[in-house]
Image: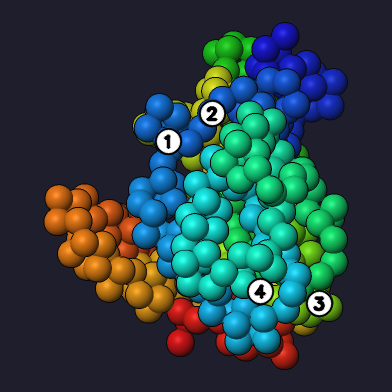
């Protein structure tokens, strides 16, 4: 049975699905979901992420982590956790760089990968054999933890609500038999979430809410408060001034219709950093940022690093310049991507946000 058949069967049984349910099934169905079947990342995959653009990205994250660990009093051992590590490239770059900066950091770090995709899990075990793997953050033990999540939150399912008249109604996905395709629809009744949605909205505005993202952030914040440490979240950010739906699908580096051929394209939604920041503060953690990825990387020193690398190997200069532009300039990933840290309120201020 294809994923399309599975979804149609569920819709016949239960009615239209929420956008979150559609997205979650398309991405994570254990046999037919996108992450169970495809190797998403890289030139031959569907999209390229910052660690795959150039090693300088991971080098800056490593510097950020080592700095925070030093200023926290160098706890030993500690957990170095990555959520959704993809091919393991970022953690490889982090560990290599950290070994040069501070061998005691690398010795003290117990690496944990949180990953649901079995295909990617295999790649990650090859890239970082010492890492412990789990599909659930709750299985990671309680201890001082430094957590990295790059392009992880945009893969978590979102609910969409549409302003109609005085109410918000949940946006759904249903099967249209006459055109033989999935289409968007609206729940017949106003959403019980209405009181929690913004008052100032125009007809047709769409807000997106991710209980899955809130749950992860609440866990990260609780850990930082109880055991110390900090998380660094970098992701494609939602623009709060644009109240429109941001669900998108990408296949072979091109945008496609998010409802056609579920399971064959990567589905993602821009991350609402305010929603994450509010959740983290409510759990007692301190929040730093969000700040544009370009400004964050430049504050941590990516430009100096690029110039040093280019001076050591002049033949790589053009590649380094182009990677710097892509990672830091607004026309690349520099401002659409944002960085934010969730930290222990009695710990040091993480670098890169002042
Ligand atoms: N961080 C990597 C990969 C980003 S792609 C990079 O920057 O290259 C998103 C990653 O998150 C994939 O590894 C995907 O399998 C994983 N993922 C998505 N949802 C997840 C979930 N709920 N739990 C654990 N991993 C998840």
Q: What colour scheme does the image use?
A: rainbow
Q: Nearer the viewer, residue 314 or 72?
A: 314
Mark sitting earlier along the chain (4/2): 2
Give me the residue at 52% from left, 64% from top.
99
Q: Residue 353 appears at what percent x and percent y?
A: 48, 81
Q: Secondary structure at mark 4?
A: strand
Q: Disc 2 versus disc 1: distance between alpha carbons?
A: 8 Å
Q: Disc 3 versus disc 2: distance between alpha carbons?
A: 35 Å
Q: Is residue 170 left or right of residue 178?
A: right
In the rendered structure, are the residues bearing label 3 and label 4 in contact, judged by CB atoms less than 8 Å apart? no
Give me the residue at 31% from left, 64% from top.
328
Q: Quadrant of the N terminus?
A: top right
**How many neighbours does mark 2 have within 10 angstroms: few (below 14), some (14-19), or many (20 or more)?**
some
Judging by the rendered image, the residue that carries numbered circle 3 is 227
In the rendered structure, are the residues bearing label 1 and label 4 in contact, judged by CB atoms less than 8 Å apart? no
Q: Disc 3 versus disc 1: distance between alpha carbons?
A: 36 Å
Q: Residue 341 appears at what percent x and percent y?
A: 59, 73
Residue 63 got which mark? none
Is label 1's Cβ within 8 Å of ligand 1? no
Residue 42 got which mark? 1
**How many neighbours does mark 3 have within 10 angstroms: few (below 14), some (14-19), or many (20 or more)?**
few
Q: Nearer the viewer, residue 339 or 148?
A: 148
Judging by the rendered image, the residue that carries numbered circle 4 is 230
Residue 75 visible in the shown view: yes
Q: Disc 3 versus disc 4: distance between alpha carbons?
A: 10 Å
Mark sitting earlier along the chain (1/4): 1
Mark sitting earlier along the chain (3/1): 1
> Does 23 sit above or below residue 219?
above
In the rendered structure, are the residues bearing label 3 and label 2 in contact, judged by CB atoms less than 8 Å apart? no
Give me the residue at 68% from left, 48% from top.
130
**How many neighbours does mark 1 have within 10 angstroms: few (below 14), some (14-19), or many (20 or more)?**
some
Q: Residue 238 appears at what percent x and percent y?
A: 50, 59
């Amino acid at each position: 049975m294809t994923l399309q058949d599975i979804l149609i069967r569920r819709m016949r049984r239960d009615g239209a699905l929420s956008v979150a349910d559609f997205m979650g099934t398309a991405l994570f169905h254990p046999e037919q979901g996108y992450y169970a079947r495809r190797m998403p990342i890289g030139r031959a995959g569907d999209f390229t992420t910052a660690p795959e653009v150039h090693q300088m990205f991971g080098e800056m994250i490593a510097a950020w982590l080592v700095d925070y660990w030093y200023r926290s009093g160098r706890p030993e051992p500690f957990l170095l956790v990555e959520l959704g590590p993809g091919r393991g490239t970022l953690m490889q770059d982090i560990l290599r760089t950290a070994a040069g900066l501070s061998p005691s950091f690398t010795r003290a770090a117990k690496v944990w990968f949180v990953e649901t995709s079995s295909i990617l899990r295999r790649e990650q075990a090859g890239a970082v054999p010492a890492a412990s793997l789990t599909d659930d953050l709750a299985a990671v033990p309680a201890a001082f933890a430094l957590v990295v999540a790059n392009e992880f939150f945009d893969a978590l399912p979102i609910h969409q609500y549409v302003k109609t008249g005085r109410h918000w109604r949940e946006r759904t996905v249903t099967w249209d038999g006459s055109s033989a395709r999935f289409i968007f629809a609206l729940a017949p009744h106003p959403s019980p979430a209405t009181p929690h949605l913004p008052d100032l909205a125009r007809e047709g505005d769409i807000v997106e809410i991710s209980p899955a993202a809130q749950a992860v952030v609440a866990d990260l914040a609780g850990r930082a408060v109880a055991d110390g440490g900090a998380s660094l979240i970098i992701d494609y950010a939602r623009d709060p001034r644009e109240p429109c739906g941001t669900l998108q699908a990408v296949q072979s580096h091109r945008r496609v219709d998010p409802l056609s051929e579920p399971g064959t394209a990567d589905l993602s939604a821009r991350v609402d950093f305010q929603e994450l920041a509010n959740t983290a503060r409510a759990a007692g953690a301190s929040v730093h940022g969000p700040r544009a990825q370009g400004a964050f990387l430049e504050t941590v020193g990516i430009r100096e690093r690029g110039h040093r690398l280019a001076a050591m190997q002049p033949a790589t200069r053009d590649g380094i310049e182009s990677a710097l532009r892509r990672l830091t300039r607004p026309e690349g990933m520099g401002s659409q991507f944002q960085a934010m840290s969730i930290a222990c309120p009695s710990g040091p201020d993480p670098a890169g946000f002042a």
